[in-house]
Image (cartoon, rainbow, N blue to C red):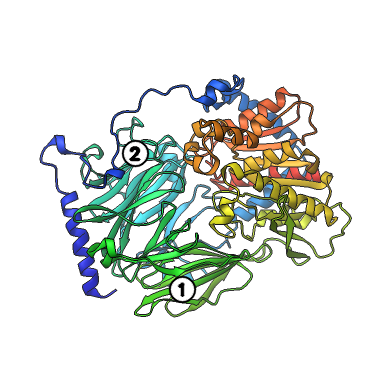
């Protein structure tokens, strides 16, 4: 971007903010929203008292509703009893301790790749090991990071900080004010929850700023405008009145240094029933403020986007299913997830920002990239002058660098390993460098430093092999689902595997939220399963993002059954190929995958002998009332709408349980502090199974959050139990 252009953009943004940031004339004006289109305005009246829903009026009484009271003494006593019984079964197995020790060695190995983030002129990293299970946030110079023995300087010792405060503190990242990156907004989670406390930290003094910015615990967001101003979305008075049903903020404010949160000026207020509000602060190559885009999240997938202008908020002409990717050479890049103006869902497009400001009615979107039928955009990152795009083609990765100039958008493919999963890491707006990781099921991760402008890729380091995969091979196969759709899946097995229907198989799937499952190097899987002759299968189900938005939408809402049919089709294909049989067939999934596993075991108990269900959604007739569940109604439907409830009931594993069925004995596990997927889901499922006389194992970790992996020791115990269960069910 030319200096004159950047200056003009900065002047426009500054002019807009000067009005928005002006101190109120009197206390009564504090918190008044800036001018913006009526479609984004909201009724600020407090919500009415909740009334019984159709679901609650029509459904029979749930005898296990009390288990939804997460920390009630009665519920926790039930959890303790379940944990003791499951521990006796799984941790007394002679394989448990070797599995635990092997996993802990993997998770605390000193030769792991220290995942890098750019911090000023250097590199930052969060490091966990046996001595620091919660981790240290640390930094080094770029030259130091390249060294074989990197010299690290500790910024925050999370274990020491947590001990001083008497609580488990988990680092959830930091947003630092470029270019110096001296001042950072550090996000700290209590026990791994999604809710975080945001505190200002000075990386020079290595201390939290005494009277600095502070946002209390919540599912909040905060972005720097300058060193004395933030854009913040949070629960402003702590009452929940400014939160959506799912617990996300509905009010975005401009907070000045030293100003009480309650006195901050409102920039955008969502409507009742919205999912959230948020903001993107876009900067030019010199880190100067270039644009501010605020987002009114109507549902999980639908949003309205507004550009801050001197006249107020300008609604951007985009489909509701769209997301803003960044700013490159004055071009505002966005992704569409619905067909729009002749462009197919999944396309990358851009607006000229200067033209938007000058004459928004005449601004036209330019195509950056239209993926083909076997392709999908997985992620984008902005460097100083380029847009990096991670692509999938038949679930194989590639990274392209896009540049904008007089001829429009051009691109070049970066020289990274083919037939690999490629993950975009950190970028630095001061140059065109970025980190990329390549890996495969049997190929340990390699960290690359790419230069998007030069088109180069420099190998920095590779993880040593964590298990013996020399005898194994990876294949991509296809199964045919119930409606004739070809479903790809990967299988990892020994080269000399016998096709005798006797191989123990662990099959994984997800199938939701347009999330793609790609080949990944999982040391615990290799060490505890593949080395012992187990077979691993990863199914690329509809509902995921492997082939773009249409692949996702094919299994949304009333079409959810397709994902379950796809999963069953892969299982049957494995049996038809004489790789395995029901006696040796196990499945594992988590979160949204909890629907997949519990529906699979209730619809097809004849196919599986082991079912691992982790951090799961299960009671789909109440999911919208539990934790963040209300934000997912765009994916699943609304149980309070009769037509939706009818099809949701067909894929609710909790209600699907029936007495007298040949269900396999599942292993169900979650986390007390999971504030994304409520622990009531698995608790009630297990209690109902037991009430019907079915055997079931349940274990609930007491901290770790939705990821259930907050520290290495917790993670080692988690996977040791997981693989002991699979060995008992599929190998013994």
Looking at the image, residue 165 lies above or below residue 295: above
Q: Which residue is mark 1?
A: 401
- Number of marks drawn: 2
Tell me, yes or no, if residue 717 can be seen here.
no
Q: Residues within 10 Å of mark 2 (few under 14, many from 20)?
A: many
User: Marks 1 and 2: which is nearer the front?
Assistant: 2
Q: Secondary structure at mark 2?
A: loop
Q: Quadrant of the N terminus?
A: bottom left
- Gap between marks 1 and 2 measured at Cα: 38 Å
Looking at the image, residue 549 lies above or below residue 607: below
Residue 467 image point, x, y percent: 71, 61
| Along the viewing direction, whichever of 195 and 652 lies nearer the viewer | 652
| Along the viewing direction, whichever of 216 and 598 lies nearer the viewer | 598
In the image, what residue occupies the spot 73% across and 38% down?
A: 603
Q: Secondary structure at mark 1?
A: strand
Q: Are marks 1 and 2 in contact (CB under 8 Å)?
A: no
In the image, what residue occupies the spot 50% across and 43% down?
A: 634
Extreme-front residue of the structure:
342
Looking at the image, residue 295 lies above or below residue 147: above
Q: Quadrant of residue 361?
A: bottom left
Q: Which residue is mark 2?
A: 271
Q: Quadrant of residue 444?
A: bottom right
In the image, what residue occupies the spot 61% across and 60% down?
A: 518
Residue 283 image point, x, y percent: 30, 63
| Along the viewing direction, whichever of 337 and 174 lies nearer the viewer | 337
In the image, what residue occupies the spot 22% across and 59% down?
A: 13
- On the picture, is 688 further left or further right than 513? right
Tell me, yes or no, if residue 430 can be seen here.
yes
Looking at the image, residue 56 lies above or below residue 97: above
Q: Quadrant of the C terminus?
A: top right
Precedes in sequence: disc 1 or disc 2: 2
């Amino acid at each position: 971007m030319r200096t004159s252009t950047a200056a003009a953009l900065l002047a426009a943004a500054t002019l807009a903010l000067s009005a928005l940031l002006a101190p109120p004339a009197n206390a009564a004006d504090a918190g008044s929203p800036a001018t913006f289109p009526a479609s984004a305005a909201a009724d600020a009246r407090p919500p009415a008292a909740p009334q019984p829903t159709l679901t609650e009026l029509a459904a029979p009484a749930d005898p296990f509703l009390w288990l939804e009271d997460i920390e009630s003494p009665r519920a926790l006593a039930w959890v303790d009893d379940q944990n003791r019984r499951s521990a006796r079964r799984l941790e007394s197995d002679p394989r448990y301790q070797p599995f635990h020790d092997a996993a802990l060695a993997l998770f605390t190995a000193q030769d792991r790749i220290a995942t890098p983030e750019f911090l000023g002129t250097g590199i930052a990293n969060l490091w966990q090991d046996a001595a620091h299970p919660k981790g240290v946030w640390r930094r080094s110079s770029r030259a130091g990071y390249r060294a074989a023995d990197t010299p690290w300087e500790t910024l925050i010792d999370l274990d020491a900080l947590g001990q001083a405060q008497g609580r488990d503190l988990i680092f959830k990242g930091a947003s630092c004010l470029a270019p110096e990156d001296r001042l950072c907004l550090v996000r700290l989670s209590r026990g791994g929850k999604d809710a975080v406390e945001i505190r200002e930290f000075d990386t020079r003094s290595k201390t939290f700023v005494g009277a600095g910015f502070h946002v209390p615990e919540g599912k909040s967001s905060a972005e720097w405008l300058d060193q004395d101003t933030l854009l913040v979305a949070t629960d402003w008075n702590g009452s929940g009145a400014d939160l959506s049903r799912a617990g996300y903020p509905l009010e975005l404010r401009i907070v000045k240094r030293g100003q009480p949160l309650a006195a901050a000026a409102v920039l955008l207020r969502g409507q009742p029933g919205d999912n959230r509000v948020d903001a993107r602060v876009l900067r030019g190559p010199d880190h100067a403020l270039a644009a501010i885009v605020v987002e009114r999240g109507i549902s999980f997938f639908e949003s309205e986007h507004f550009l801050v202008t001197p006249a107020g908020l300008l609604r951007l002409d985009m489909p509701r299913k769209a997301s803003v990717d960044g700013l490159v050479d004055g071009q505002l890049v966005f992704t569409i997830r619905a067909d729009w103006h002749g462009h197919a869902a999944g396309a990358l497009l851009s607006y000229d920002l200067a033209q938007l400001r000058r004459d928004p009615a005449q601004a036209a979107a330019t195509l950056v990239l239209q993926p083909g039928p076997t392709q999908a955009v997985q992620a984008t990152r902005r460097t100083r002058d380029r847009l990096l795009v991670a692509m999938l083609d038949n679930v194989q990765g590639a990274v392209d660098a896009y540049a904008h100039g007089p001829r429009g958008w051009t691109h070049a493919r970066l020289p990274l390993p083919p037939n690999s999963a490629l993950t975009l890491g950190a970028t630095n707006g001061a140059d065109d460098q970025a980190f990329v990781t390549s890996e495969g099921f049997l190929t340990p991760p390699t960290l690359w430093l790419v230069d998007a402008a030069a088109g180069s890729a420099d190998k920095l380091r590779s993880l040593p092999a964590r298990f013996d995969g020399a005898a194994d091979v990876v294949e991509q196969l296809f199964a045919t689902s119930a409606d004739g759709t070809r479903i790809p899946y990967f299988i990892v097995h020994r080269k000399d595997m016998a096709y005798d229907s006797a191989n123990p198989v662990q099959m994984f799937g997800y199938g939701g939220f347009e999330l793609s499952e790609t080949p990944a190097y999982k040391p615990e899987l290799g060490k505890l399963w593949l080395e012992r002759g187990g077979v691993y299968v990863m199914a690329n189900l509809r509902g995921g993002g492997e082939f773009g938005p249409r692949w996702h939408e094919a299994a949304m809402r009333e079409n959810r059954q397709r994902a379950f049919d796809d999963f069953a089709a892969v299982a049957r294909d494995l049996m038809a190929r004489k790789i395995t049989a029901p006696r040796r067939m196990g499945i594992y999934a988590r979160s949204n995958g909890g629907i997949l596993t519990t529906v699979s075991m209730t619809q097809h108990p004849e196919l599986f002998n082991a079912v691992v269900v982790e951090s799961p959604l299960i009671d789909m007739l109440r999911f919208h009332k539990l934790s963040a569940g209300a934000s997912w109604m765009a994916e699943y439907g609304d149980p309070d709408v009769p037509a939706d409830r009818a099809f949701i009931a067909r894929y609710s594993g909790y209600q699907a349980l029936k007495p007298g069925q040949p269900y396999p004995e599942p292993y169900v596990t979650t986390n007390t502090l999971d504030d994304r997927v409520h622990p009531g889901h698995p608790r009630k499922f297990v209690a109902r199974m037991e009430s019907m006389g079915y055997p079931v194992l349940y274990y609930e970790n007491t901290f770790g959050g939705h990821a259930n992996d907050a520290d290495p020791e917790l993670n080692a115990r988690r996977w040791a139990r997981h693989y002991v269960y699979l060995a008992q069910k599929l190998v013994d």
